[in-house]
Image (cartoon, rainbow, N blue to C red):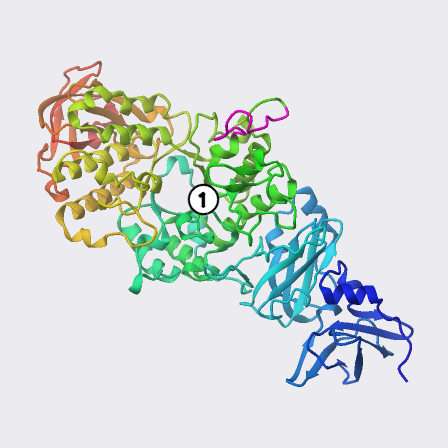
Amino acid sequence: MTPKFNRASEADVEDLVAGRHSDPFAVLGPHEDHGGVTLRAFAPGARTLFAIFADGERFALDARGANGFFEGFCPGKPAFAAYRLAAENEGGAWDWDDPYRYGPILGEMDDHLLVEGAHLELYRRLGAHVLTHQGVEGVHFSVWAPHASRVSVTGDFNGWDGRRHPMRKRVDSGLWEIFIPELKAGALYKYELLSASGEMMPLKADPFGQGAQLRPMSASAVPRSGKFAWSDADYLAARAQKDPRRAPMAIYEVHLGSWRRGENNRFLTYDELADSLVPYARDQGFTHLELLPISEHPLDASWGYQPIGLYAPTSRFGDADGFKRFVDRAHAQGLGVILDWVPAHFPTDEHGLAWFDGEPLYEHADPRRGFHPDWNTAIYDFGRREVANFLAVNALYWFEQFHIDALRVDAVASMLYLDYSRREGDWTPNQYGGKENLEAIAFLQRVNSLVYERYPGAMMIAEESTAWPGVSHPVHANGLGFGFKWNMGWMNDSLRYMSQDPVYRRWGHNQLTFGLLYAFSENFVLPISHDEVVHGKGSVLSKMPGDEWQKFANVRAFYAFMWAHPGKKLLFMGQEFGQWSEWSEARSLDWHLLQFGPHAGLSLLVRDLNHLYRTQAALHARDCESDGFEWLVVDDSDNSVFAWLRRGEANDPPIAAVVNFTPVPRENYLLPLPTPGRWREILNSDSHHYGGSGVGNFGAVEASPEPSAGRPASARVTLPPLGAVFFLLEPEHIREV
């Protein structure tokens, strides 16, 4: 005779079978009951179901109809007793460890810190994690969805059936969790959610997922556990001792998917890129690699700037461990790694964050603040503590888990201004009636402060295109707290100047001098980035006027101007060897061009510029300080000649840079200098080695004590056509400067 026990109500059974029960752990699993335990389980497709305990005792569970719901009483068994469920039908038999016999993993502290926006280890708690719970290895899933009435994890392990693994809700925080025993790394999954009104939402990828399927598929993947064996301790220790403002920073900006392709136009893996890209960038003399966003993203044509999985390195090139190996290899070669990071907005793909639990959650509810009209994307609700914390923790995650050296924050201007790219009436002011986004400002200040506090020598870099004051000033000085800011004004002015025919440059002379009026108001990076070589803008080489020889000469002179100019350097891939065509994310760079002399010469010049920049303190130590720069010739617009002095510390030899932006050689050009003595020509962009005409000063010039332009000395120098020359003061004369 079947003993009496507390049976589940018809309503509970109906809701569980229909996939709409909001508290499945209250019904499923073991429940103490009259000297034993009542077990309930949902096993769709099973004809019979047995509970088998660790001592071998076996109990049949009764079917409540043909809907897959079973329950039964197991006398003498405590609620904590371990058991397995064994099912049979006409097709065979199968068994599993019941997830509903396991207690929660998250605790009250997780709830509290999440709601307060102060959970800095959140990526270790949310998402999918292989771990051992109650002595059994499996996968713990957790997701934040406070508006949902039911959340389930679905995947290739349960037939994507959202009724199979509904999750436990933590009502104080809106977190949902479940531990699925015996599940392994690599399992594919998504979350199935019912809104507060019971509406089924599209399946959602995991916001904290640390792995993902390759597009066009969009599931998250359970990451592997285990500690990565890093070998960069010495590199990180040395980084911690540096002041990035005083150190050389020559950045090679790279889109991993199109730097180079494999056979049949396939993507290279992270390991293949470590074998090829890392030594190439090192040999070219760059100090850092900056990678366009590698967070998982559905659309190749977005270049990564519309990410869905902020915590998942894109599977286009391999898994997370592969990217760790890439960073480790870069550090072994002395190269820093900078990631482009996109906290400003996110795409509205249905499997992403948009209306995640049936209501605006990650995005601001008011479309005047929550929707970006230029990009058709959603804007994060920076004023919601859980959302701001989600983003801040993501920044820390890349530093902590992947040892990156910097984040370059994309589209900062769009975050700072409530009226950014909006017409009057399409935006709402802040509480004081202004257009500043106070919540976004507070978020940026917080994340910058956290990074600089936790990771010595790391950097935060802003792509900010307006005159917002104090972007790279400390938070305690009312700045945003970034370490560096891209100098978009310098980029626009200099490229506009260079695109002019030399005959007209005399009337645009101030386009190259104006930048020095504000060059030290921020810690600047001079960016010739991917944005300047797409969408009809042409490559750097194709922007230049003149015939082919003049185009290459212009580029060489421009790069010499840039490398001698105050500010850190950034150059997008392909521009170092003079790619003719615009960049496309769909194919490799035109590496075959290096077989031709002008392209090989330009590549050699960039390598030599990087070598000088790294080894000569005058060219980098005071990039961000006004006393490291002095004009020597600023007003020779008729000849389109510019000359200036760069200084390092007191004992560092100064360097005089002179650029002639016309195709006319200038002989016996009077160059004012700060001291008499021997000034050695250490670079000539017109050298035959670089594809130039070979006009120059053949070793050195002697500066006499003949005053010129208010300087106590001067020298007669030869300026090559569309060329630049650098002169280094010989060491015995340094004390006289």
Q: Position of residue 431 (x, y in %)?
A: 64, 25
Q: Is residue 423 magenta?
A: yes
Residue at the location (70% across, 61% down)? 167
Q: Secondary structure at mark 1?
A: strand
Q: Is 459 or 442 nearer to us in this picture?
A: 442
Q: In the image, which residues are magenta?
A: 417-431
Residue 102 seen in render:
no
Q: Is 110 or 244 nearer to us in this picture?
A: 110
Residue 123 seen in render:
yes
Residue 618 drawn above or below residue 689: above
Q: Position of residue 101 (x, y in %)?
A: 75, 69
Amino acid at dot 1: Ala
Q: Is residue 721 magenta?
A: no
Q: Position of residue 204 (x, y in %)?
A: 59, 56
Residue at the location (49% across, 36% down)? 373
Residue 282 drawn above or below residue 96: above
According to the picture, the residue beneath numbered tag 1 turns out to be 406
Query: Which quarter of the rendered picture does the N terminus lie within?
Result: bottom right
Instruction: Give residue 523's quadrant in the image.
Output: top left
Query: Which quarter of the rendered picture does the C terminus lie within?
Result: top left
Judged left or right of residue 577, residue 162 is right
Q: Is 580 or 726 nearer to us in this picture?
A: 580
Q: Main secondary structure of the magenta part?
A: loop
